[in-house]
Image (cartoon, rainbow, N blue to C red):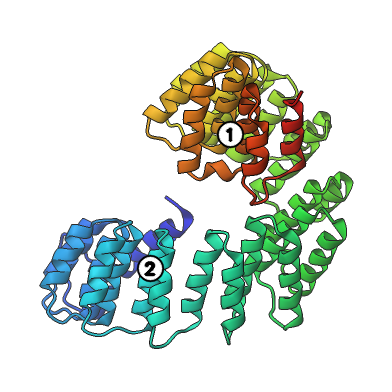
Amino acid sequence: MTLSRRLLHIRFHSTFSPSVRGTPLTHLVQCNRKIQELSQLGRLAEARRVFDSMCQRDSVSWNSMITGYTRYGMLEEARALFNAFHGKNVRTWTILLTGYAKHGLVDEARVVFQSMPERNVVSWNAMISGYVQNGRLQCAKELFNQMPERNAASWNSMITGYCRCGMMSEAHELFHQMEEKNSVTWMLMISGFVEISEYRKAWIFFSIMFRHGVKPNQANLVVALSAAMGLKEIRLVENLRTVAMKTGYEGNVVVGTAILNAYTWNGSLDHAFKYFETMQERNEYSWSTMIAAFSQCGRLDDAISLYERNTEKGVATRTTMMTAYAQNGRIYEARLIFDEIENPNVVTWNAMLAGYAQNGMLEKAKDMFFRMPKRNPSSWAAIISGFAQNGETQEALKFFAELLNSGTIPSPSSFTSALSACANIGNVGVGRQIHSLAIKTSTHFNSFVGNGLISMHNWQSRKQFYVSNFPVRGLTSCISFEVLKSGMP
């Protein structure tokens, strides 16, 4: 149970002395609050018993119970209660609409929206946001254009949609049309440019925001630090550190860890460690960031020393140290840490699996893979790349086929490894099928996958085709052209 839930649990039991199963509570305000708190804890059956026991209900009672059902995906129950409620207000309709959209049933959400006897700006925003969240940007745009009135949330929803699709020109146009921008608007634009690696534009937007007198919040600072990392300019990190100090955020552990990460990303290890030692508060990720930085710069002894200094090692810190050992060929020590972790998560399993694969211990990697209680796309990527990089191309392709059969969407790394395997054995037929699948999943536009495609097609002298048809969105990297040249006579 998370801390917030534990606190809610304590508050619930200290506020209400009668048992849910005991004498029905009749006080309207108390009952409504009890339904809300039980619903937030996921105790919907108990919340429903309180609801059913009430002698008197108001719209808050009904809306709270319907909200609980939609939050946990119990949409049939939510709909049944919605249909039974004869005093529905605009909030009731919006709750059901939002529930359908949140769980991917955007067409059902639109039916609810169209059926509403009255709508307010919140209803319109909920429907637009539902379209955006489900990738229906054109529908969102059409609805946005029909809105009788808009607020900042309306504009931000549309900007979010464009940013998610990398359509920054359209996002920029909306941004300029927006009369009253808030800190969320600025953050969306900055993070949108970061997402497509337009770090300079992201930094310019942050600078303009600052000049406009918008005080950066935690999210703005973290995103701006991502832009500084992309630009690899240490002076920008220093500038942001000054801004964090002036705005009272340097003591914030999230911002502090982001500053630390930016230092390490720029290769300023001494700056990073000096800053680490002055941090007012550190969390598990602060320790992990510094340990990983030492390891990646070949300073394993410093990484070990720092790891041993940490008296409260969590799963993330242990996993980082485990990875550091494995990357330096000390797989025995890595396994010792793995065995110390009481409940390793999927990231920890993946790290140990990758460690074995990187050290050529493929049978142990395979054993880890099959023993995993839960796998994610990174698990498959680790096993496929492990076999591919060790020359076991047939085994790599076998695992890629199993990945497809499992229904899991391959990660860019899995596509790249599979295409490299096809290149190594000259199997262009299978490579074309993988290429086709990459296009369907949009992974075709990842530069690493693009390089894998070029490597595979170089076997059949397809260089000219790929020079003229290689996707443009940031993919014509130096690496890509080097790969092309390597296959040319």
Residue 323: tell me if it is visible.
yes
Q: Is residue 170 above or below residue 374?
A: below
- In the image, is residue 399 above or below residue 151? above
**Of the residues shown, which amino acid type is indicated by label 1?**
Ser
Label 1 residue SS = helix
Q: Give the foreground label among 2 and 1.
A: 2
Neighbor class of circle 1 (other Cα within 10 Å; few <14, some 14-19, many 20+) is many
Considering only order in the chain, which callout, 1 or 2, is on the residue closer to the N terminus? 2
* Left or right: where 212 falls relative to 353: right
Q: Quadrant of the C terminus?
A: top right
Q: Position of residue 198 (x, y in %)?
A: 70, 59
What residue do we see at 63% from left, 14% from top? 391
| Label 2 CA crowd tier, 10 Å (few <14, some 14–19, many 20+) | few
The residue labelled by disc 1 is: 413
Q: Are marks 2 and 1 in contact (CB under 8 Å)?
A: no
Report the amino acid beneath label 2.
Cys
Q: Position of residue 378 (x, y in %)?
A: 53, 34
Q: Label 2, on which residue?
A: 139
- Under circle 2, the secondary element is helix
Left or right of 300: which side holds 173? left
Q: CA distance from mark 2 to mark 1?
A: 33 Å
